[in-house]
Amino acid sequence: MSDLPQILSVLGDGLPDTILATLGGIVLTVVLAFGAGLLLLSPRTWVRGITRVYVEGFRGTSEVVQLFWIYFVLPVIVGYQLVPLVAGIAVLGLNHGAYGAEIVRGAIRSVPRAQYEGAVALNLSPAQRMRRVILPQALVEILPPLNNLFIQLLKSTAVLALITVPEVTRQAREVLIPNFGDDTFLIFGVVFVIYLVLAAAITLVMRLLERWAAGRLGRRPVKADPLEAV
Amino acid sequence: MPLWDWDYAFSILPDLLLALVTTIEITVLGSVVALLLGLVFAVIRRARIPVLDQILWAFIEIVRSTPLLVQVFFLFFALPRLGITLSAFVIGVVGLGVHYATYTSEVYRAGIDAVPKGQWEAAAALSLPRSRVWTGVVLPQAIPRVLPALGNYVISMFKEVPLLLAIGVVEVVNAGREIGSATFRYVEPYTIAGVLFLLLSYPASLLVRRLERRSVRT
């Protein structure tokens, strides 16, 4: 127990990278999820085809493989080495963005057809239709599974330890375990608490967003479907 | 030197395929743990036994919300302190299995909740013993409905096996790393590793999707 202050300080040093990776990954995930999600609904076959390749490619391979590929293989091909944290954020975003794209696509498709027809009848342009009618309704369906996806992403940041990003898990594994072997349980206890708190923070923010999105439509928030595998 | 050397790629393929077998072994064994333990969790939680229910809830929440890699490290470094020494392979199976059991327990729970109340009442009216209510009435209706979701988790597990390279399990990616560090060529091993994952998990996910569509129809 006497080592607790040092343990906290070493893990605290890893916290910024864990948080940065999570936030960066979330931003990239949201951009890719909505971008690819909309492209998956494009009327053009080749646009859908290319987007499918991205989505299935990242959903079909292991995150560790993607990480190692971007970090070790890509530099050989393009001759430019990414900073570990940046490579990590790229993989987190690309990977979870592919899963998010399916969520967005499904939610948009689940908006009742009459809503499209109504928007057409009101002479809204396709962009207006999407932005003002379809997306606000889809968003209510998107947010709960997105919460799960973001927690999944937070947990995935631990993988960045494998490419030397000094985030919480690597700090525990490389600095604490070799030096404070007697405190193994304490170290992991603190690490578990850190991730639990971060996960709770994500859920809290998402709940607020869900309430806001549902309130905008004059509805109550919907519950996440437990059968929805991430 | 060319970017991609076919001769080299073919020469390392056997080693990578061998490591793929290890990956599949861990996936299958881990799935057995996850599918059985998840069911046990779901059935126990359904009984709502005081204290045990809260403990199980807390356990599931902690495991679900923290990284698998951290849990694997925990098993790897903490178990020996309790005098339990397991091989990295077994730790991988247990870590993966328990982590995913917390997911499958939620899936089973949803499936069990979807069984109409009348089925429970009818089973009670027939005064079936508790075990027969589960094995003869509830689970045969609950499980087919959730098979696609369970299948998705098995595929996810397969893709998470490479994490175990962190504790020295020689699965596909680790085999690629060992080959790469000996030859200083990483392009082929890691690319082949990626292709192998895609070749197995994409058809598997198509299969699950078909199962999904069929279960929606019935």
Image (cartoon, coloured by chain):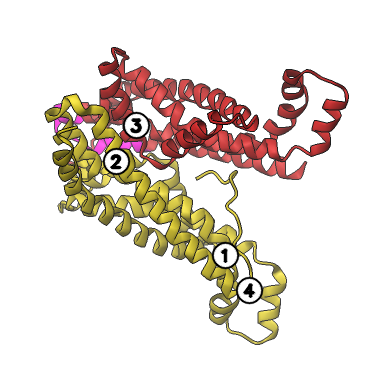
Checking the image for residue A65, the label placed there is: none
Q: Give chain A's shade.
A: yellow
> Which dot, 1 or 4, sits closer to the camera?
4
In front here: A103 or B67?
A: B67
Kindly indicate whether the residues beneath marks 1 and 4 are on one polypeptide chain. yes
Q: Name the residue under label 2.
A: A159
Q: Is residue A176 left or right of residue A118?
A: left
Q: Quadrant of the C terminus of chain B?
A: top right
Q: Mark 3 points at which residue?
A: B71
- Dot 3: element: helix
Residue at mark 4: A218
Q: Which residue is drawn at 41% across and 22% down?
A: B93
For the record, the magenta segment spans B180-194
Q: Is residue B140 left or right of residue B70?
A: right
**Type of amino acid at the residue the image marks with label 4:** Gly
Q: Which residue is drawn at 32% across and 34% down?
A: B69
Q: Is residue B14 above or below residue A119?
A: above
Residue A147 appearing in the image: yes
Say which amino acid is labelled 2: Val
Q: What residue type is labelled 3?
A: Gln
* Distance between mark 1 and mark 2 Cα atoms: 31 Å
